Image (spheres, rainbow, N blue to C red):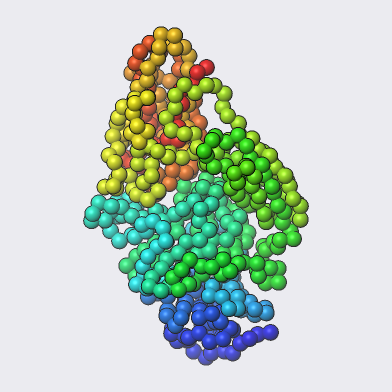
């Protein structure tokens, strides 16, 4: 039954006030009242979200752009339906359908995006454009683009030497169930949903917010080329949602999506009866490091943290054959497979596979991150040129006496190569060794070039498979984890002080922080 289906002849007033649950429609807008002090409007010509009035206050930006999927559909066929306590507005253009959903008595706009193919612009995102004067604060990171552009059109230098970028608002998928912007007595949060059709795995991250002079943009990035490690997954992205509060973090009930079911008619929707569950037991991860399980195939991805006993559970998995991964923090340490059928509960066991050889010394921990290294804690939120960063320069690190924080998180060919490692060998320790370098990301074909005792050079390995885009300067160290291993013959070593020089080599060009380089995870000296 339609609670309200009356037609308005003209454009609706921008200051539409909350009334009772229902909708009205004119030639240019569908206006939906959620019955919870939230009224939103969708443009019937293009499917943009063009008004969000919460407690009588318009939160949509003062700029002419609407809130929209991608950069807008241009033109769309818009329909609205009421199904019990739910109102659904759908906007369709070509093979894409964007859904806006209201559930009675909730101050939320729930969304879903059916996109079986990737848009020509090469990315899929929903951007909510909010009034920055009313919602000036971001929940995470520095996200202002007000300053002098120093790299592309997305990294900026502020007058005090700090840097900012929309990329620095990002957090790993596994740590980002929702993010938001806020102001006095009001907040809007993006509920990210299950992320099953996103790409990049549990530690991939993408833009969350961006601030301009008039607009605070709140994002759900479903796919981009921002240091992307996987191809696009097509189908129904979501449901996800915009949650409105009086400033507090949303209550769990506001993020409850259980009302979204087959009755709503969302394209590509798979209900709980058509999904399965995986219980995993994870073991062998290094003491003190967290364990995670990941499932992935071309159609979907999932992940879960293990508890103190190494047990993890993943619910709501689409049917299919999945590659399974055990992560030691962010480093892949075991692989397997599992098959999921509708309504079934699969069991999975993964045990970490430790590379052979005794570690004589190491710098850092093999966990898929540069944690503890010079400037590592700042890489996610600052450009490498930021005034808060310690200087990047060529240096010497002495095993056994130098602090871990002296060792660089990143090695660039044009900035800080080489890094020298000094270490001592006793007369009875001169033998063949292996040098292992764990890397989390490389750019411009960068890979480690090794020189021992300022003479002998190890054969240069091929470039690793990495995203073909900037990453390190965009606030991430996450690409494809790679292990480079070099055999160091005893004839290159001697009793007493020895040295290994590590530089970034590549056949590609680049200047400064965009020159070939890579992010360190761990360096190990291994006895054969």
What is the number of callouts on the image?
Answer: 0
The N terminus lies in quadrant:
bottom right
Q: Nearer the viewer, residue 272 or 185?
A: 185
| Residue at x-position 33% and y-position 48% | 383
The single residue placed furthest to the front in the displayed view is 308
Which residue is at 46% across, 50% downward?
226
* Extreme residue toward the left, this view: 159
In the image shown, does 137 or 87 lie closer to the viewer? 137
Left/right of residue 51 with respect to residue 183 in the rendered view: right
Residue at x 57%, y 36% (from the top left corner): 285
Q: Is residue 489 above or below residue 229?
A: above
Q: Position of residue 127 (x, y in %)?
A: 47, 65
In this view of the protein, which residue sits in the foreground, 167 or 95? 167
User: On the image, which quarter does residue 416 sit in?
Assistant: top left
Whether residue 74 can be seen here: no
Horizontally, is 190 left or right of 281 in the view?
A: left
**One can see residue 64 in this view:** yes
Q: Where residue 332 sits: x, y (%)?
A: 56, 38
- Residue 325 place in picture, x, y as percent: 61, 41
Query: Please, which residue is most extreme toward the top here?
Result: 427
Above or below for 121 versus 130 = above
Residue occupying image coordinates x 65% and y 51%: 314
Considering only vertical position in the picture, is 515 above or below 315? above
């Amino acid at each position: 039954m339609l609670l309200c289906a009356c037609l308005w002849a003209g454009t609706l007033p921008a200051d539409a006030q909350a009334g009772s649950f229902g909708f009205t429609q004119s030639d240019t807008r569908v206006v939906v009242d959620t019955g919870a002090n939230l009224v939103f409007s969708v443009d019937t010509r293009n499917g943009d979200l063009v008004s969000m009035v919460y407690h009588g206050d318009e939160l949509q930006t003062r700029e002419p752009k609407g809130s929209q999927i991608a950069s807008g559909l241009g033109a769309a066929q818009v329909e609205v339906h009421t199904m019990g306590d739910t109102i659904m507005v759908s906007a369709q253009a070509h093979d894409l359908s964007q859904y806006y959903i209201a559930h009675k008595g909730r101050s939320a706009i729930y969304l879903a995006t059916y996109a079986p193919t990737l848009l020509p612009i090469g990315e899929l995102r929903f951007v909510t454009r909010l009034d920055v004067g009313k919602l000036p604060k971001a929940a995470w990171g520095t996200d202002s683009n007000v300053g002098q552009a120093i790299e592309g059109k997305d990294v900026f230098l502020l007058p005090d030497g700090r840097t900012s970028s929309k990329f620095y608002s990002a957090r790993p998928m596994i740590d980002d169930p929702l993010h938001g912007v806020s102001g006095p007595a009001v907040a809007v949060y993006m509920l990210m949903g299950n992320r099953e059709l996103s790409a990049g795995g549990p530690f991939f991250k993408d833009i969350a917010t961006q601030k301009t002079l008039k607009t605070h943009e709140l994002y759900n990035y479903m796919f981009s080329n921002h240091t992307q490690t996987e191809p696009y997954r097509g189908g129904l992205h979501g449901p996800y949602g915009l949650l409105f509060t009086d400033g507090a973090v949303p209550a769990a009930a506001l993020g409850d999506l259980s009302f979204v079911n087959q009755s709503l008619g969302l394209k590509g929707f798979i209900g709980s009866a058509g999904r399965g569950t995986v219980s995993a037991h994870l073991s062998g991860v290094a003491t003190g490091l967290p364990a995670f399980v990941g499932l992935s195939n071309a159609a979907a991805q999932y992940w879960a943290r293990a508890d103190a006993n190494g047990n993890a559970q993943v619910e709501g998995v689409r049917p299919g054959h999945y590659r399974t991964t055990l992560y030691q923090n962010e480093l892949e340490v075991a692989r397997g497979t599992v098959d999921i059928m509708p309504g079934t509960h699969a069991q999975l066991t993964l045990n970490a596979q430790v590379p052979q050889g005794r570690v004589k010394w190491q710098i850092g921990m093999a966990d898929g991150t540069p944690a503890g290294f010079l400037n590592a804690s700042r890489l996610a939120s600052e450009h490498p040129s930021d005034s808060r960063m310690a200087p990047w320069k060529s240096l010497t690190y002495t095993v056994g006496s130098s602090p871990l924080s002296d060792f660089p998180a990143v090695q660039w060919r044009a900035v800080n190569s080489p890094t020298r490692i000094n270490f001592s060998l006793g007369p009875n320790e001169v033998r063949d060794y292996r040098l292992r370098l764990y890397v989390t990301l490389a750019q411009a074909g960068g890979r480690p070039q090794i020189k021992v005792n300022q003479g002998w050079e190890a054969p240069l390995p091929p470039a690793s498979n990495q995203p073909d885009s900037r990453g390190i300067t965009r606030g991430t160290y996450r690409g494809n984890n790679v292990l480079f291993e070099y055999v160091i013959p005893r004839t290159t070593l001697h009793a007493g002080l020895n040295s290994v020089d590590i530089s970034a080599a590549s056949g590609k060009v680049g200047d400064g922080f965009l020159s070939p380089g890579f992010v360190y995870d761990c360096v190990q000296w291994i006895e054969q």
